[in-house]
Amino acid sequence: MHIQLSHPSRTVEIKGPKKTKDLLKELNLVVEAHLVIRGDELVTEDEMLYDQDQIEIRPVISGGSPRLTSPR
Amino acid sequence: MNCTKCKTRAVIDLPRHNAAFCKGCFNYYVHDQVGRAIKSEKMFGKDDRILVAVSGGKDSLALWDVLLKMGYKADALYVNLGIGGYSEVSHAKVVKFAETVAAPLGAVLHVHTVEQEAGAGIKELAMLIHRPTCSTCGTIKRYQFNRVALEHKYDVMATGHNLDDEAARLLGNVLRWQEEYLDKQSPNLPASLDGFAKKVKPLFRLSERELAAYSVLNRIDYIVEECPMAKGARTLLYKEVLNRLETESPGTKQAFYCGFLDKQRKPESSPTTMAEKDQAMLHPCSVCQQPTTADVCSYCKMMARAKAHAS
């Protein structure tokens, strides 16, 4: 299947069928920090993904300020 | 996987709540969590005018969307920092959301452009004054946010800080024991004196993953690309560590941050020292006389059980 990744933007090919959580594990990606989108639909961890699927794995972490305080 | 509530096909699973939701039930969950945050922290009411700080990212646009759909009077401020193509894209996404979603609901977008006022973008400004870009950015955003709130007489300012942001900041402050900053970690910072508008964080009960999912499900077109100035920031490392803990032990981030808030609300009860606590709770075991909180200590209970099994 065709996988679109970000940060940096790149694509990889992975052989299906494969469960979403196993795909993330294979790519060494943490579930809590990513969304898996098939076409334009979100899929859950137990969803089976197939070779013909267009998959986007979108990172959800953002924020850059090194400042740890919360000044006014 | 099926939706925990309506049993149709789920689109997102939430291990920390041991639940999975379809789009409709997930939207209800998000609105409910924001409603609980607003109510429990007494953030604002339906008659208050709110100014939302929007960046073009998932959290701030989701916040604006949720508040408008919940019937609040929420306008927004976007600060264009002049970070080349990144600012151009984020600005365009904010304007698109404002025109297609917010304006039909009667909301207004304010824009402040750093280059117009300062003659240079954030990167050049930071170099001129020899300060880190993220720190310069934070100062400008906070200043402009407060200025617009006061000038346009908004009752409260709202930011898109989420559970991950607050847990990561708390971890950083605790790792360095920066206790003086912990007071400022409340999701409701009141207008303590003239010139400071009230500031709230209605998304503090929702994780980044949940907010990204809300944006995807509701077709909110946000900037996925990370700010080029944020690379290598320590906050990202703390978030990564917390997410690894969360994956292994769902609910960790919520327990860490919300537990901190609970502790802050409760007045320190006496006795406070270890010795005072021990004196108040411990007494001699009725069998061996060693200190215990129960009638018989756990050692004597364990040995009695072992002897009963052996005989």
Image (spheres, helix red, strand yellow):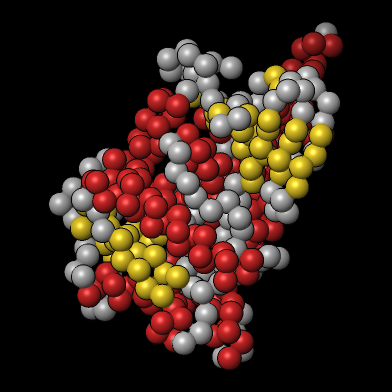
Res B195 seen here: yes
Figure quadrant of residue A30: top right
Total marks in image:
0
Q: Is residue B214 above or below residue B79?
A: above
Q: Is residue B143 above or below residue B31?
A: below
Nearer to the camera, B36 or B72: B72
Residue A50 shown left or right of residue B279 in the figure: right
Nearer to the camera, B56 or B258: B56
- Residue at horizontal 34 percent and vertical 53 percent from the top: B98
- Residue at horizontal 56 percent and vertical 64 percent from the top: B86
Q: Residue furthest left?
A: B47
Q: Is residue B149 above or below residue B305?
A: below
- Residue at horizontal 21 percent and vertical 63 percent from the top: B155
Q: Is residue B301 above or below residue B40?
A: above
Q: Quadrant of the C terminus of chain B?
A: top right
Nearer to the camera, B302 or B255: B255
Q: Residue furthest top?
A: B311
Residue B103 shown left or right of residue A14 in the figure: left
Figure quadrant of residue B232: bottom right
Q: Quadrant of the N terminus of chain B?
A: top right
Res B261 seen here: no
Q: Position of residue B291 (x, y in %)?
A: 65, 42
Q: Position of residue B128 (x, y in %)?
A: 58, 91
Residue B154 shown left or right of residue A62 in the figure: left
Q: Position of residue B178 (x, y in %)?
A: 56, 71
- Residue at horizontal 47 percent and vertical 34 percent from the top: B217
Q: Position of residue A50 (x, y in %)?
A: 74, 21
